[in-house]
């Protein structure tokens, strides 16, 4: 079968093939979904200001994150429950990422554990997203597995002390049919069907910067904090031993009406970009969005839903195609913007539409 050519086409096909309640869980945002929509619109409000008569015969999409050269800045965001999108689940997504040269960030709420994913894609670059569960033993075990299986960093998600208002999931009563299909959920002792709305109950809402500082100090792995929108919090991250922040509103799924990553990024890059790595996510759907993110100070972007759409439509090959089309579009964008090296992107390359 022929795979779609754009992420929008993948999204439309995924809506046809997915079970409606699973689709609603993946596609949905919080409350009125204003932030969900604005995540897309915000990139569209930024124009690229191209330069001409620049020799772009040789181009370099590479970026440096956590001190390591990466072939391009397109990373896979942590998203829960890939097994609901396709029976091959996270092992397939991780292999797809590896084939596309994309770093893979595994969710704490995955339907495969860190060891299984590492074995499926041994040569890939991988990070582990960490939820600090009320049952700290479950999180400790995840960290141990990450250390043992070659994960390079921990990405602690800090924008989900409680679950956002997920009206779609309330209406659809979305569940994972078997709690044990997600090893971390099973490890908390849950059995049987597990509702999407119960996710919040697993997570420790008392987490503070002191916990982050302790984790960063004790852990053998660098710690990033995901879900920062305020420059003040980015400053605190830098002061608490964190190696990087992901500017993110959780794909519009947590607090509705917060700024998009695109809007929050410039002030955060200004505040801490010279000390720690700044990444951004939310609404990245085109190579031009990637270019704008790097121009505004990000070292890399994370891509959430598009990878799930690829997985749902075509398993490993579908997820790989999604990532490869973004990589190819980013290369075209660099050439046409007259910036042959991604490292040369800066605020001069973009203008905010009035
Ligand atoms: C997420 N996200 C997320 N984040 C995280 O830190 N841990 C997780 O387990 C999940 N789970 C999850 C499930 C689903 C279905 C979605 C859509 C998102 C948030 C994710 O990492 C990322 O911030 C957003 O998805 C980025 O926005 P886009 O690319 O989906 O627009
Ligand atoms: C979500 C959680 C799992 O957004 O991060 O559904």
Image (tube, rainbow, N blue to C red):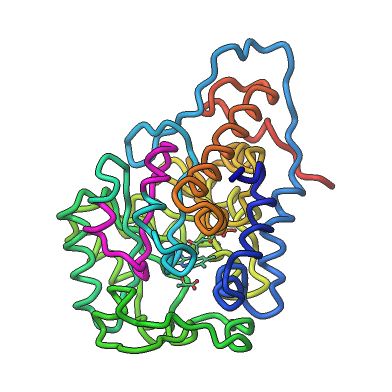
Number of marks in picture: 0
Residue 153 in the image, given as x and y percentages of width and height:
29, 52
| Closest to the observer, 83 or 36 | 83
Compared to residue 67, the image places residue 26 above or below, namely: below
Whether residue 247 is visible: no
Q: Residue 41 vs residue 203: left or right?
A: right
Image quarter hosting the N terminus? top right
Q: Is residue 336 magenta?
A: no
Name the residue: 40% across, 88% down.
193
Q: Is residue 99 magenta?
A: yes
Q: On the image, which quarter does residue 344 sit in?
A: top right
Residue 257 in the image, given as x and y percentages of width and height:
68, 72
Name the residue: 59% across, 11% down.
57
Q: Which residues are magenta?
A: 95-118
Whether residue 46 is visible: yes
Compared to residue 341, the image places residue 32 above or below, namely: below
Q: Residue 22 vs residue 16: left or right?
A: left
Residue 45 in the image, given as x and y percentages of width and height:
77, 49
In the picture as drawn, the residue positioned furthest to the front comes out as: 1
Name the residue: 35% across, 89% down.
192
């Amino acid at each position: 079968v022929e795979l779609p050519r754009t992420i929008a086409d993948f999204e439309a096909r995924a809506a046809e093939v997915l079970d409606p309640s699973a689709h609603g869980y993946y596609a949905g945002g919080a409350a009125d979904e204003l932030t969900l929509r604005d995540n897309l619109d915000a990139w569209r409000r930024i124009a690229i200001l191209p330069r001409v008569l620049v020799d772009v015969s040789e181009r370099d999409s590479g970026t440096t994150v956590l001190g390591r050269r990466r072939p391009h800045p397109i990373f896979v965001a942590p998203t829960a429950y890939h097994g609901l999108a396709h029976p091959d689940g996270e092992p397939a997504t991780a292999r797809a990422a590896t084939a596309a040269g994309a770093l893979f960030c595994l969710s704490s709420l995955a339907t495969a554990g860190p060891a299984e994913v590492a074995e499926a894609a041994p040569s890939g670059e991988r990070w582990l997203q960490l939820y600090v569960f009320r049952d700290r033993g479950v999180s400790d075990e995840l960290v141990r597995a990450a250390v043992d299986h070659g994960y390079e960093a921990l990405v602690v998600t800090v924008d989900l002390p409680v679950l956002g208002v997920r009206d779609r999931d309330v209406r659809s009563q979305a569940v994972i049919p078997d709690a044990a299909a997600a090893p971390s959920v099973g490890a908390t002792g849950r059995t049987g069907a597990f509702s999407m709305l119960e996710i919040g109950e697993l997570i420790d809402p008392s987490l503070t910067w002191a916990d982050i500082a302790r984790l960063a100090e004790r852990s053998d792995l660098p710690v990033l904090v995901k879900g920062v929108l305020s420059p003040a919090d980015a400053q605190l991250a830098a002061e608490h031993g964190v190696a990087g922040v992901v500017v993110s509103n959780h794909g519009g799924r947590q607090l509705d009406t917060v700024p998009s990553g695109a809007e929050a990024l410039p002030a955060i890059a200004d505040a801490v970009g010279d000390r720690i790595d700044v990444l951004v996510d939310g609404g990245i759907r085109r190579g031009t969005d990637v270019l704008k993110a790097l121009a505004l100070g990000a070292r890399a972007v994370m891509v959430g839903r598009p990878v799930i759409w690829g997985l749902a439509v075509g398993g490993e090959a579908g997820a790989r195609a999604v990532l490869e089309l973004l990589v190819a579009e980013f290369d075209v964008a660099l050439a046409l913007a007259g910036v042959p090296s991604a490292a040369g992107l800066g605020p001069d390359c973009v203008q905010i539409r009035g």
